[in-house]
Amino acid sequence: MERNALVDLHMHSTASDGTWRSERLVENVLKAGIKLFALTDHDSTENVPAVALLAAQNGLSFVPGVEVSTLYENRTYHILGLGIKPGHEALEPMLAKNRRLMDDKDDAGIQYLASIYPERVSFEEYLAYVDDKERGGWKSLNYLVDKGLCTSHKDFFSLFIDWKEAFSQVEFPAPQQAIAAIKAAGGIPILAHPGSRSYDPDTQKILKDFNDMGVMGFECFHPDNNEEATRLCLSFCWEHGLRITGGSDCHGDFVPSRGLGHPLVRLSDLDLEGITILPPGEI
């Protein structure tokens, strides 16, 4: 692959909170001129096999991936597993548990709102509600949009400001557990978007802590990373011999500001040593 080839190693499909099913995702990757990409759904590898097949058929290089939710110092951190084997026994139980945790939290959140807005929100109605995955987001969000209590993910969380069981308190696994599971599944663990506003604002601390916990690289290029965060990440990776990755975190039409290929990342910008890449034609 040419060193100036466009790369995007972070995107989502309908298997988590994106709006694109496998076929449409690959169609849009092709339109964007991206030659190497990864599918990294939140706590799910459901669409990885289908996307791998479509990538092979369309002359694209592909990295099987996932984005694992973890809890550290009462904050949720996301760890990308790049080059993992989908369905691996070391990883899938953790992903399934994370999905159950979020489902349980959504159920509790709807029950909380039903106690405040009994004339508008019904837990029984919510249980019967059929979510349209191509809307993106998640079931409780789309239900509450349809009920007129919020308009998007941007004001969804404001509904729960006074709820003592905040969404940030989901008991996801510790980062070390996710890192070990990703490695056991043949993947390379990468801390996603170190510059995220939901993380500790001390980026240097994040880099040191997660390096000590065993990540093998950082997502240096991401829409949430400002210039300073990108500089810090790159310097840290160069100093410690860590992998350098980047991606758009595209969710299809769900988050319009995150388009494929933004930020612009080329293969020459990255260090992907050890990450399993399926070349065109190989499944």
Image (cartoon, helix red, strand yellow):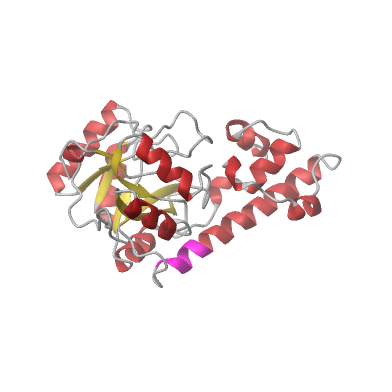
Q: Is residue 257 left or right of residue 231?
A: right
Apparent side of residue 173 relative to residue 36 in the rendered image (left or right): right
Is the C terminus in the top left, top right, bottom left or bottom right quadrant? bottom left
Vertically, is 39 above or below 28?
below
The one nearer the camera, 202 or 104, is 104
Residue 249 showing in the rendered view = no
Look at the picture and state if 7 lies above or below 93: above
Answer yes or no: is residue 80 visible: yes
Taking the spot 13% from the left edge, 43% from the top edge, the residue there is: 239
Q: Which residue is rendered at x = 71% and y = 40% of the image?
A: 144
95 within the magenta span: yes
Instruction: Tally the numbered discs.
Output: 0
**Bounds of the magenta span?**
91-96
Q: Quadrant of the N terminus?
A: top left
- Position of residue 52 measured from the top left corner of the image (x, y, whole percent): 37, 56
The image shows residue 240 at horizontal and vertical percentages of 15, 48
* Residue found 79% across the figure and 40% down from its top: 116
Which quadrant holds residue 87? bottom left
Q: Residue at x 75, y 43 (%)?
A: 113
Secondary structure predominantly adopted by residues drawn in magenta: helix
Res 104 quadrant in image: bottom right
